[in-house]
Amino acid sequence: MTILEFNDKINTILCKGQGLKSILFDLESSKIISNMVPYSVFLENNFFLFEYIGSDDRSVVRGVCCVVVIRNVSVNLLFKEIKKPLYDEYIIIFTNKIGERVLEELADNDRFGVVKEVYEIYMDVFYQDVGMYTVMPVKYGGDCIERCVDGIYSFLVHLNVKPSIRVIEGRETVKIIGETLKRRFGGEEYKNGGELVIVDRGCDMITPLLYNWRYQGMIYEHLEYKDGLVQFKDKFISVFDDSFFIKNRFLDINSVGENIKRQVKEVEKNKKIKNNEDVCNLEEKSKIVEIAENHLLIYNYLAKECLENKELSELELNIIKNNKITIKEISNICNNKCVNFRKRIKILLIYLIKNDFDFLRNSYQDNLFSSKVVQMFPEFIQIIKRFGEKYIYGDCSDKNGIIKTKKYLPVFLNEYDVKLDNVPGFYTFLESVIKKNLKEKYFPYILKSTKEYKYTIIYFNGGLTYEEYRIFNEFCNKNTKLGNKMFILCDKIIGYNDIFINII
């Protein structure tokens, strides 16, 4: 696995120190690095010991250089470490900017002179897929806004860019993030120009509620899939270097099924060793067999989910497509106790967002109940209210709860299958960004850059879906002659299960 954007930073970590080496992480830096560098690569570069800074079960190791890779929030653990050093020398690598005061305290605590070198490498984000990074770990208990700013800032500085900053109008959190970034840059100048556009999940709450019919999105919704690892029962499957997954992740589930059949047939054909050349390739063939078996397991599981969700998915999409779905049809589903509770709420929420202005106008306030549709479903009222507060109006800058932000709703291509027909409104947004058609009314500037744009970075606050990532990836591939490179950052990956965890 090669993360081109961070090759130089990764090489900095791998090449520091002489002879046998140990490496110390904190909890976040461990995940940052492991998402980008396989364990085997560290072994190839003379790292033999991997430990967490601050851990109590560590012992003295003499004659070994220790490379420390930590976030700036772990400096107190670093101070304790060098006060009572377990290694002869330390090379300190921070994943983000540190202040002079930290360096002074580091020098004060280094009574034994064990700190030999200190670096800032600006690698404070979590790789998820090509061109996509999250700025927060899956579980985080600190200041979320500060962590988001740290991640975005480090990524921009890594690109050597001080961009124009634009934020979607009407949302307090994204405005705070944009203004904090502006202050963080201060009067500093960087080589490259670019544009950072900060958008909020609230501009499209329909997409994360929909069933996803593409392989990567389905894996996320129906299995445990985090940081490149898929958990299937007790088995963990890494897909970062998985050739089948990389080729098939954006395909619909039926196409994936056909490709798995072909892969399995190919494996069966090559199982017998025929000559010496095959013996040399045995390890590679074993890996291919393992990949085929893994994806056959995953596919069979997902195929069962498809059968259960097919009709409901078509109903959801027909609601959005304005195919004359009546409130009576919605009522029949929502009052049917044989249908899973979450699935019933999901249908109702999609209908409300698409059709009920009273809900959109007032869900933030007690007069939520002015929505006649909501009144029809008393068992769902509190859940609907929590959904409105968390995802529609809790962050709205207009305290009357009236949404003024531009909405990006899914559009349809009139394909043969409605489940594969919809394109998230995110595509429309991307086109507006690239064509420089974003209206300042909806995306005001917080900072303007006078330099020619070399990079376009989208930050999606409130969670990005894998369907939107697929659209982003395809958009970039179709627009390779744009002249500026695009990246997408987000605070987290999101799907309908994540939404229900927060409201039920």
Image (cartoon, rainbow, N blue to C red):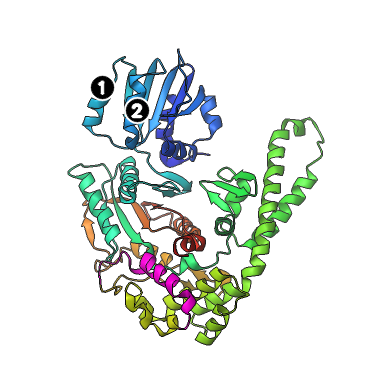
Q: Is 223 on the left or on the right of 472, as rendered?
A: right
Q: Is 278 on the left or on the right of 202, as rendered?
A: right
Query: Where's residue 59, x and y in %?
Result: 47, 19
Q: Is 455 on the left or on the right of 221, as rendered?
A: left
The residue lying at 53 percent from left, 78 percent from top is 318
Identify which amino acid the numbered label 2 is placed on: Leu
The residue lying at 24 percent from left, 50 percent from top is 180
Answer above or below: position of 400 versus 180. below
Query: Where's residue 415, x and y in %?
Result: 57, 74
Query: Circle 1 sits in a helix, a strand or a loop, which is it?
Result: helix
Relative to the observer, which residue lies in front, 116 or 107?
Answer: 107
Answer above or below: position of 221 versus 282. below
Other residues around mark 2 within 10 Å, as few (<14) / some (14–19) / many (≥20):
many
Query: Where's residue 445, x and y in %?
Result: 23, 59
- Tell me the quarter of the picture where residue 277 sits: top right
Other residues around mark 1 within 10 Å, as few (<14) / some (14–19) / many (≥20):
some
Q: Which segment did they paint magenta? A: 376-399
- Tell me the quarter of the picture where residue 25 sits: top left
Q: Which mark is residue 107?
A: 1
Residue holding disc 2 = 78
